[in-house]
Structure formats: structure tokens, C-alpha cells
Image (cartoon, helix red, strand yellow):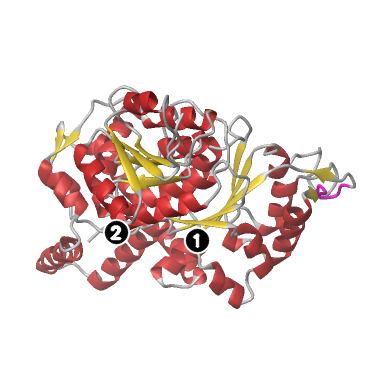
Amino acid sequence: MTEPRSEIWIADDDRGVRFVLAEALRDAGLLVREFGSGEDVRAALRDARPALLLTDVRMPGEGGLALVATLKAQDIGPVIVMSAFTDVATTAAAYRAGAVDYLAKPFDLDQAVAAVQRALADVPIAQAPAPEPTTTHALLGESPAMREVFRLIGRVAASDLNVLITGETGTGKELVARALHDESARRDKAFVALNTAAIPSELLESELFGHEAGAFTGATRRHAGRFEQAEGGTLFLDEIGDMPLALQTRLLRVLAGGEFYRVGGRELIRGNVRIIAATHQDLDTRVAAGQFRADLKHRLDVVRIELPPLRERRSDITLLAQHFLASAAKELKLPPKRFSRAALKAIAQRDFPGNVRELENLCRRLAVIAPGVEILPADLGATTSTSTASGWTEALREWAVQALADGEVDIHNRAREALDQTLLQVALETHEGHRQHAAAALGVGRNTLTRKLGASRTRRPSKP
């Protein structure tokens, strides 16, 4: 068997992709051999071995992931996979099968050449082959930003490294955490989630580490905390930036030593848990302000995955909207509906400050209240970024004209109260009832928000 170790093999059923990639590699001084199918590669392996294989994931006949597994079994490689259909499951399966890198089509040729040169310089790590992916994840997206997120999830899921997920509220941080768990070796163990901002600080320690009977008033029996519940699996700590400093110190000790005591307990418990944390806040700023421990940040921020806001991935909005509408109809057992082309265009132009969660809520409402099978722009209300502001102010103008014409009194106070009530309700819905976050988003103090909430409960103003 001859072994032209400097030869790069390209397997792709798209002749155009093979041509431009091969030319770029030849320009970089590499020898290249092209194949149109996985079967052709397998036949060539009887007489030769490549220095590196670049293979498309989806080809007629044998797919790229099967090729990766075959080459790893024969200790041939490294292998770089390519695909225009980037998703979490496929990306993670490629890395598990033994791929050293993943190129999302269309890719920059300089980036591809650099990936090949990097792979040739590195010693590939042998890994067990994996079957074709069957897992379906809730994360969706075809934009370059989301493809990079999928690629990073695939690369780090199989490791036990702690991960910090950052991004604005509603971008899908828990979905990323679940994908990391589902694609890891811990997938058969528990995935336990805790929103640290939703638990009162005096109860958070017990929620995390558990407590013994009699540890405090009301503790009538032993309680296993989230660390024990997640044993062998993954613990997802959402809104980690809001954790009290005293509890940050204890969490740091657990991460450093892997041991903890229940509240009021004397039994030392050793845990085996992977930590995935998330926050919408800038932890570096909180560290500088003395509100978050720098050493804890370093423990959590081993690998960072930053989720883009929806406004930075507008090309995904129509895909997400159609998915959410279909899912809502199925979940709520309603007749399926579809968006008209004009309605999809209107949604794609809209700003979603609540990100994916706000878009999902909109689609769920449309699944219930839209009157026809086809959703029209009129069903959406003011949807575009240019019409949102003018839409509600024009409605306010019409109300004020009618109210003055009817001789109504106290118009200013009524309008102001209705505005306050609407803003408060939307902010609380967007931030899942968290008053501090809702107040910050509105630019008011928490005490102001609480006072206005109390006022809105005692009097329900008519809407302007």
C-alpha cells in the first residue's frame, strides 16, 4: 500500500465546491485528490491513505459521518467535515466521531486552508466512532452567528469543561445548556436547572446544597439539594450574576474541591457534576464593582458561548416564526395555520427586545387568536421597526381626540396610568416576573416599579 502522506483528499458531491477548495489548497502548496462520493473514498483507501480528508456530511450513498468513523477505526486522519446544514446534533456527532474541525458552508477559502494546515500540524485525538445523529434540538438557526454557536457546542459538549453562556434575556441560554448536556457523555444522567435570581437569597443555599432535618425553622426532614439531584449529570445555574457574594464563596469551594455539606449537616458529600452557568449581565463589570468574585468567574468561564440577540440574526426570524407557529398549534391541539408572505416579511422587520422568547410568545398568541388559516399582516398589529412607535402614538392621538370631543375629564392621568400599567406588565412578562430586571429594563428603580404595581392593582384605568 502506498501512502502519499502529503496528499489531501476532498469528498463532496458538489463539483463546484471540490474545484474551488482544491484550487485553494493547491495554491497553498498541497497535493489534492478529489472524490464525488463516500464509496469512491472507500475504494481508494484500499490502495492509499490521505494525510487529511475533507468530507461533506451529506452525500448520496455513504455520508461523511460514516467516513469519519471508518477512518478513525483505521487510524487514518485527521478529518475535517463540511456541511451547509449546520445544527447541534450533526456538529456534535462529527466531533464525537473523531473530526478535528467543522466548516459550515459557505466558508471562506482562507479559513478552510488555515483549518487544513492547523489539522496537519496537530496530532489528532482518537475517539470512539458514533452513529448517525438522531437527537433533535430546540435550537434553530441558519445564520452565520448561530452556525458558530452550533460549532462551539459540538466542540465542547463531549468535554467536562465548565461553560459560561452569555446573552440577552430570551436568547435561549437554557436551550444551549440542554444541548451541551444531551450531546455529552452525561446525557443519561440528570439535567438539573436552577434560576439563582428566582430564589430568595436566604433559601438559595438550601436549594443548592440541601439541608438536614432541623437545620432551620420549617426544615422537618432531610432535603437533597440541586447538586445531589444532578449527581453524575449537569447542573445549570441560570442568572449566576445575581448570586449573593456569601454564596459565591461557598460555590467556589465546591467547584475547587468537589465536596460540600448540606445546610446543618456534618456529612461530607463528594459530588461529580458538570457546571454550566448563564447570565445576561457583564460579569467583568460586576467583578470590577465588587459584586462578583473574580476567582469564581474564572472557574465558571472556562469556555464561553455567547448567544447573539435576535436583531443580529434577522435571517433566522422567519424560520423560527414558522417553527413556533407549527409547534404551538400542535401543543395546543389547534388547527394548523401558516403565515402569508407579507406577514413573514413584516415579522422579519420587527425589533424583538425580548428576543426569541418574545417571538415565540407572539406566535403562540397568533396560533390562538388569528381568525383565519393564513396569518395576514393585519393580524400582527404594529410589527415593523418603523411602524411600532408611530402605530401606538397614532392610536393614542385618536383616543385623545375622541376623549376630548366627548368632554371626558382627567385625560392626562388616565393615559399615564394606562401607559405605566402596560409597560410594567410587558416588562415583567419579558423578564419572567423578576422585578429587579424588569425595573432595570424600564430605567426605573425597583421601589418605583413596586409602588406603581401596587397602584395599578388598586385602580384599573380604562385604556386610552
Closer to us: 117 or 405: 117
Q: Main secondary structure of the magenta part?
A: loop
- Which of discs 1 and 2 lies nearer the camera? The answer is 2
Q: Residue furthest front?
A: 2
**Can see residue 293?**
no
Residue at label 2? 311
Dot 2: within a 10 Å radius of its alpha carbon, few (fewer than 14), some, or many (20 or more) residues? Answer: some
* Quadrant in the picture for residue 372: top left
Question: Is 262 contained in the magenta span?
Answer: yes
| Image coordinates for residue 204, horizontal then vertical, percent | 68, 53
- Which quarter of the image is occupied by the C terminus? bottom left
Q: Does the stretch in magenta take in 451? A: no
As helix, strand or loop, the secondary structure at mark 1 comes to: helix
Which residue is found at the position 80% from the left and 44% from the top? 270
Q: Nearer the viewer, residue 24 or 464?
A: 24
- Which span of residues is magenta-colored? 260-265
Instruction: Name the kind of residue labelled 2 in the image.
Output: Arg
Disc with the residue nearer the chain's start (1 vs 2): 2
Residue 48 at least partly seen = yes
Left-right relation of 441 to 267: left
Q: Relative to the observer, which residue lies in front, 366 or 450? A: 366
Which residue reaches farthest right?
Answer: 266
- Residue position marked by numbered label 1 in the rendering: 435
Badge 1 crowding class, 10 Å Cα cut-off, few under 14, some 14 to 19, many 20 or more, is: some
397 horizontally vs 133: left or right: left
Instruction: Give the residue at x 34% y 55%.
Output: 29
Q: How many numbered marks have been drawn onto this rendered protein structure?
A: 2
Give the x, y percent position of residue 193. Answer: 58, 44
**Residue shown at 61%/73% (left/top)?**
287
Label 2: which secondary element: helix
Q: CA distance from mark 1 to mark 2?
A: 25 Å
